[in-house]
């Protein structure tokens, strides 16, 4: 096949214990999947304690490894959101909850970096969030740990420190919508496929970071991850 210019390389993540890499197809993110974070963002409590899930996307090439990550332009309020990331090895549409975990290849620790000021202005005007959420290098993510090695983490700490100070501390058990439910619900909107990543939401404690800050985070049963904003 002839192209008018060389196609961009396929974004990919390292796989723990393997020389093979995980090719990234799409990146989906769940909004407000921890009640404490939903409250700090101003959401109203639902009668059953669960806000219906909603999703937004980031470009596949927004996913970058740990280490030095560039501070983005056009913001004075960059904020961190530590998340459990689900990497799909299988897909489908209208996937039943009972079969959803069969689609998971593995898990990783990731950061949903957010230009909060840009997002806030978009919300005020009813505009899309894309430039607040989907900018370059907005999804730093650690290596993927296969289900065969770690199983399916359903409880345990999820945390983030900035320059050694704890900013976020939660538990996977407090996700409003569990991983299987997230996959099943998302599959009613799009046909999921191998290579899709799903960021599953963040606990409370999101706050502003600046150039030079070091962010260290982790998820129990998955691993730890670190970046430095430059």
Image (cartoon, rainbow, N blue to C red):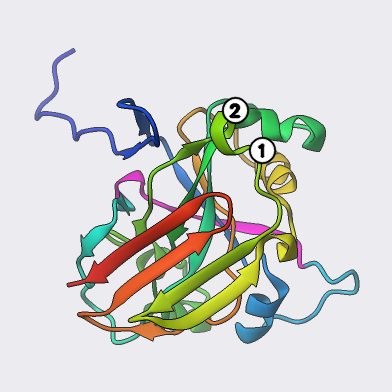
Residue at the image point whose x is 27% and y is 83% from the top: 210
Residue 109 visible here? yes
Q: Position of residue 43 (x, y in %)?
A: 69, 80
Q: Position of residue 63 (x, y in %)?
A: 33, 50
Mark 2 surroundings within 10 Å by alpha-carbon count, few (fewer than 14), some (14 through 19), many (20 or more): many
Describe the element under mark 2 as helix, strand or loop: loop
Which of the 4 quarters of the picture holds residue 9?
top left
Residue at the image point whose x is 33% and y is 63% from the top: 226
Residue 206 visible here? no
* Residue ID for mark 2: 91
Which of the 4 quarters of the picture holds residue 148?
top right
Give whichever of 84, 70 is nearer the camera: 84
Q: Earlier in the sequence, mark 1 or mark 2?
A: 2
Q: Position of residue 17 (x, y in %)?
A: 39, 32
Point out the stretch of residues depicted in magenta. Answer: 51-61
Describe the element under mark 1 as helix, strand or loop: loop
Q: Position of residue 68 (x, y in %)?
A: 20, 63
* Residue ID for mark 1: 187
Magenta span includes 136: no
The residues tagged by marks 1 and 2 sit, at their Cα atoms, a distance apart of 8 Å
Give whichever of 66, 5 is nearer the camera: 66
């Amino acid at each position: 096949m002839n192209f008018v210019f060389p196609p961009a390389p396929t974004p990919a993540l390292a796989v723990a214990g393997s020389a093979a890499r995980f090719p990234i197809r799409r990146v989906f993110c769940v909004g407000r999947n921890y009640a404490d974070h939903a409250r700090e963002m101003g959401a109203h409590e639902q009668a059953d304690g669960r806000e219906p899930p909603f999703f937004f996307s980031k470009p596949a090439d927004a996913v970058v490894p740990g280490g030095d990550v560039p501070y983005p332009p056009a913001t004075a309020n960059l904020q961190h959101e530590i998340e459990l990331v689900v990497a799909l090895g299988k897909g489908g549409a209208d996937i039943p909850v009972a079969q959803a975990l069969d689609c998971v290849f593995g898990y990783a620790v990731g950061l949903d970096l957010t230009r909060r000021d840009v997002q806030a202005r978009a919300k005020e005007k009813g505009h899309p969030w894309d430039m607040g959420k989907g900018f370059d290098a907005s999804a730093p993510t650690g290596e993927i740990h296969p289900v065969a090695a770690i199983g399916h983490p359903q409880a345990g700490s999820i945390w983030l420190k900035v320059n050694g100070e704890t900013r976020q501390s939660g538990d996977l058990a407090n996700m409003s919508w569990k991983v299987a439910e997230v996959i099943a619900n998302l599959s009613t909107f799009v046909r999921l496929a191998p290579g899709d990543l799903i960021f599953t939401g963040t606990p409370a404690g999101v706050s502003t970071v600046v150039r030079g800050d070091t962010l260290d985070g982790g998820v129990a049963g998955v691993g730890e991850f670190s970046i430095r904003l430059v």
